[in-house]
Image: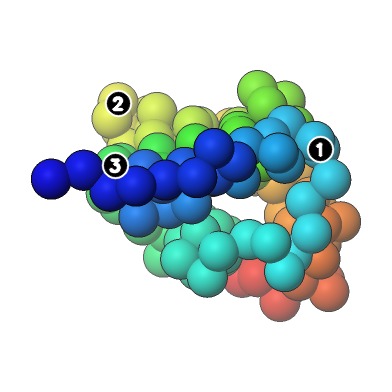
Amino acid sequence: MSQQQSADSVSIDDISIDIANTQSGNVDPTDVPDKIESITRGLASQYPPTNPLVVLKVARWWYVHGKGGTDPAFRWAIEWVRHLATDTPSDVKWFDEFLEYLVTVGIADETHELR
């Protein structure tokens, strides 16, 4: 059975995608779904998620609603999935940029609050 969706929003895996707001680069913290914010904060924590499918959902949301392939949250999520899949060290440069970005978009006031 299919679910009816409006022309300006779609839902994939219960994560809403606002078509009108795609790749605007201007992410308002109030527009970030609770589930996405929670997992994003988890990626910034000392014990990040280890399920690559969960991390890819977050990557997809940030790609669509952030700056596309250059969005720091998207890039860190993809880097973390690469780490999980290959068991190779992740690039710390991406992580630092990710933390600073979360402060910039208003997910946290300071980077140390995320760890």
Q: Is residue 95 left or right of residue 50?
A: right
Residue type pointed to by label 2: Thr
Lower position in the chain sequence, tag 2 or tag 1: 1
Question: Which x, y percent locates residue 14?
Answer: 35, 55
**Residue at left 21%, top 43%?**
2
Nearer the observer, disc 3 or disc 1? 1
User: What numbered label is drawn on residue 53?
Assistant: 3
Residue type pointed to by label 3: Leu
What is the C-alpha distance between the residues marked 3 and 1? 24 Å
Q: Is residue 74 left or right of residue 30?
A: left
Q: Specify few, some or many for label 3: CA neighbours under 10 Å numbering under 14, 14-19, or 20 or more.
A: few
Question: Which x, y percent locates residue 6?
Answer: 50, 45
Nearer the observer, disc 2 or disc 3? 3
Q: Is residue 59 left or right of residue 102?
A: left
Foreground: 36 or 44?
A: 36
Whether residue 64 is visible: yes
**Residue at left 82%, top 71%?**
110
Figure label count: 3
What is the C-alpha distance between the residues marked 2 and 1? 30 Å
Residue type pointed to by label 1: Gly
Disc 1 marks which residue?
A: 25
**Residue at left 79%, top 59%?**
28
In which quadrant is the C terminus drawn? bottom right
Foreground: 104 or 23?
A: 23
Lower position in the chain sequence, tag 3 or tag 1: 1
Q: Specify few, some or many for label 2: CA neighbours under 10 Å numbering under 14, 14-19, or 20 or more.
A: few
Q: Is residue 4 left or right of residue 62?
A: left
